[in-house]
Amino acid sequence: MVDIYMRYDGGLHCSATHGPSSVLLATDAPRDNQGKGESFSPTDLLATSLGTCMLTTMGIAARKHGWNIDGIELHVKKEMTQQPPRRVERLIARFSVPAAVAGGLDAETKSKLEHIAHTCPVALSLHQTVAVDASFDW
């Protein structure tokens, strides 16, 4: 169990402190919803959580099996609904794998890594109405 302490700082800004490490994270409302977009929005953090969870769980498997995945990059695009209620409608995750990494992985390993990304804890925790479109550029 992890404790996270949050506070509303005013002006649509919030701060959150990670209990175990005391690392501080700041949020702001997005520009299209009354904010200044000066930091991650709460829904940006959802997209960030998905992407970093995918990469982290892939990294755990890579460490366990001796696979090199260093340098894999991920771009997650967040799409919001156009009609109320406002929510994340779709997350598009595009993995870019360096040729040196891709060349060192066989087809079965690549398939396993894709499965791991699709079934990371955050992906499994998202509501079914949030579409996740993940693809890998091997």
Image: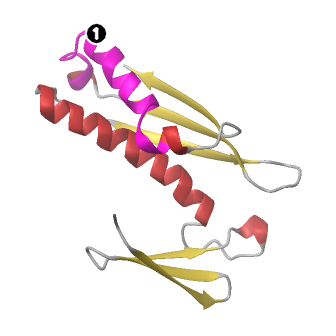
Q: Is residue 111 above or below residue 125?
A: above
Q: Secondary structure at mark 1?
A: helix
Q: In this image, 68 relative to 7: left or right?
A: left
- Quarter of the rendering containing residue 104: top left
Residue at the limit of the structure toward the top, as seen here: 107
Residue at horizontal 71%, vertical 39%? 129
The quadrant of the rendering that contains the N terminus is bottom left
Determine which residue is flagged by label 1: 108
Name the spot of residue 90 as percent of width and height, x first: 67, 40
Name the spot of residue 103 as percent of width and height, x first: 22, 15
Q: Is residue 100 above or below residue 33?
A: above
Name the spot of residue 3 as percent of width and height, x first: 38, 73
Residue at horizontal 55%, vertical 54%? 46
- Residue 115 magenta-highlighted: yes
What colour-coding does the image apply?
secondary structure
The amino acid on which the numbered mark 1 sits, given as a three-letter code, is Glu
Q: In this image, 48 relative to 34: left or right?
A: left
Residue 69 appears anywhere in the view = no
Residue at horizontal 34%, vertical 67%? 2
Residue at the limit of the structure toward the bottom, as seen here: 10
Residue at the limit of the structure toward the left, as seen here: 66
Residue at horizontal 77%, vertical 65%? 32
Name the spot of residue 89 as percent of width and height, x first: 72, 43
Q: Which residues are magenta?
A: 101-122
Residue 125 appears anywhere in the view = yes
